[in-house]
Amino acid sequence: MSVRGFTATRRSGLAAAVLVAAGMLVAPASAAAAANPANLPTSQYTLSANYNQFGAINSALVSTLGTASVHTVMTNANHDRVGLPSSFSIPGLETGFRFDSADNSDCKSYPQGITTSRDAVGTANGGNYDGHQLVLVSWYTNDACGGSGERTRITLVDWDATYPNKYRKVLLVEPTGSATTPNFKDIPVHAGGVSWYGDYLYVADTGRGMRVFDMRKILKTNTGGTADQIGRQSNGTYYAHNYAYVLPQIGTITSSTTSGTALRWSTISLDRVSKSMVVTEYTCKSGCSSYPNRKPRAIRYPFGSGGTFAASTTASQALQLDWYNLNGVASHNGRWWFASSGQKQLYYWTPSAGQATYGWVSGAESISYWEDATNADLLWTLQEGVGNRNVFAVTQATYDG
């Protein structure tokens, strides 16, 4: 039986259900402050997919370095996750964790996107991928505290009582060089969203679309060298900032629109019911210099029958939103959730029932919908703030209007 992490941090689903029924947890705020999402022409939003962009170089890297399965990576997990602090409380809280003290307080690296093995495989086999039930978080790293973006990584966190409470970091890299002299370099993107479907991992690339990775092609690298060394060295050794594992990009999903305003890929999430990916934008109502000052959009792109995007894909749903500072999105079975870090609110909407607004956490980031065949479905999310990086799950029924 699959067990979600620390039993000490779990909240009773029955107790939460009773409180919800009694109206004691959280009540929707007035919906009058914002207009309901409006439909946009879906034909204006398309994707171009290339899953074999780095095929020859990746084959050479695999041949040269060898691969490690997800199971092997987790067998060698070398960081301890810890429980949520007793002071952390939010309606519907079910479970969660924090990274170790070094990662919780690291001012150079920031967690952003979240996905799980339940996204990858659904509820089959207890939601296990390669024998592990996992929570996956994407991070971007600055070259200094408050500096410019330098690299991107993911963290694989074991979330099953069968295994230790451990996690492992894997560096994301872009292949370079040639098939005869393969190499790789850092990927300096914000990684504001991440989603796992089948064997493929999709990472949001703000101005372009998504970068694609294959979880079956994690490469083994030499942990020696210095912390600033990356890629192939003159003696043929491959370093990766002392990481033991790197995950090379295999392809790119490029976004285009005829609406006149390029889509900003701020965060993404998987909808397993409709077999689609949803994306939304971080924008401001006014006064921002680093972000657009306009209403954001939420776009849905369907996967093809084979579980990947077709060479060309047209959106199946496009919405104009009246909410701002959106760092998180989720959609499941016709329902939508949008998390606003700036407003500390979680917005819920369905076309039939309308909208509801809930109080939410500070520093809110991405959302992942967790399907469960035997227990309540959950919404997994996280906070990015230094010293306050809670990764947690709430019962989705607490926030469904």
Image (cartoon, grey):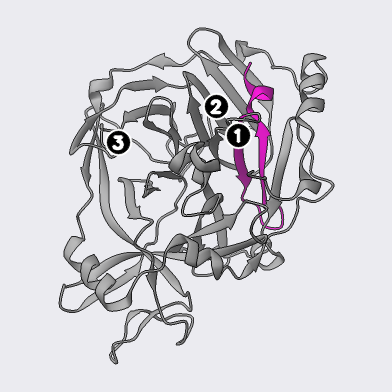
- The answer to if 400 sits in the magenta stretch is yes
Mark 2 touches mark 1? (CB < 8 Å): yes
Tell me residue 109's x, y (percent).
56, 62
| Residue type (three-letter) at the residue carrying disc 3 | Ala
User: Reading the chain from its start, which is encountered first: label 1 or label 3?
Assistant: 3
Q: Residue at x 66, y 62 (%)?
A: 164
Q: Is residue 108 left or right of residue 37?
A: right
Give the CA separation, mark 3 to mark 2. Answer: 23 Å
| Residue type (three-letter) at the residue carrying disc 1 | Leu
Query: Which residue in the protein does label 2 denote?
Result: 337
Which element type, helix, strand or loop, lies under badge 1?
Answer: strand
Query: Which residue in the protein does label 3 denote?
Result: 262
Image: 273 above or below 350: below
Check disc 3: other Cα within 10 Å, few if <14, some if 14-19, many if 20+. few
Q: Residue furthest top?
A: 352
Q: Can you tell which mark lies on residue 117?
A: none
Q: Within the image, what quadrant is residue 218 found in?
A: bottom left
Check disc 2: other Cα within 10 Å, few if <14, some if 14-19, many if 20+. many
| Residue type (three-letter) at the residue carrying disc 2 | Trp
Q: Is residue 31 left or right of residue 38?
A: right
Check disc 1: other Cα within 10 Å, few if <14, some if 14-19, many if 20+. many
Tag nearer the camera, 1 or 3 = 1
Q: Within the image, what quadrant is residue 53 found in?
A: bottom left
Q: Residue furthest bottom?
A: 235
- The answer to if 26 sits in the magenta stretch is no
Tell me residue 201's x, y (percent).
39, 49
Query: Which residue in the protein does label 1 denote?
Result: 379
Confirm whether residue 163 shows in the render: yes
User: Reading the chain from its start, which is encountered first: label 3 or label 2?
Assistant: 3
Stretch of the chain drawn in magenta: 377-401
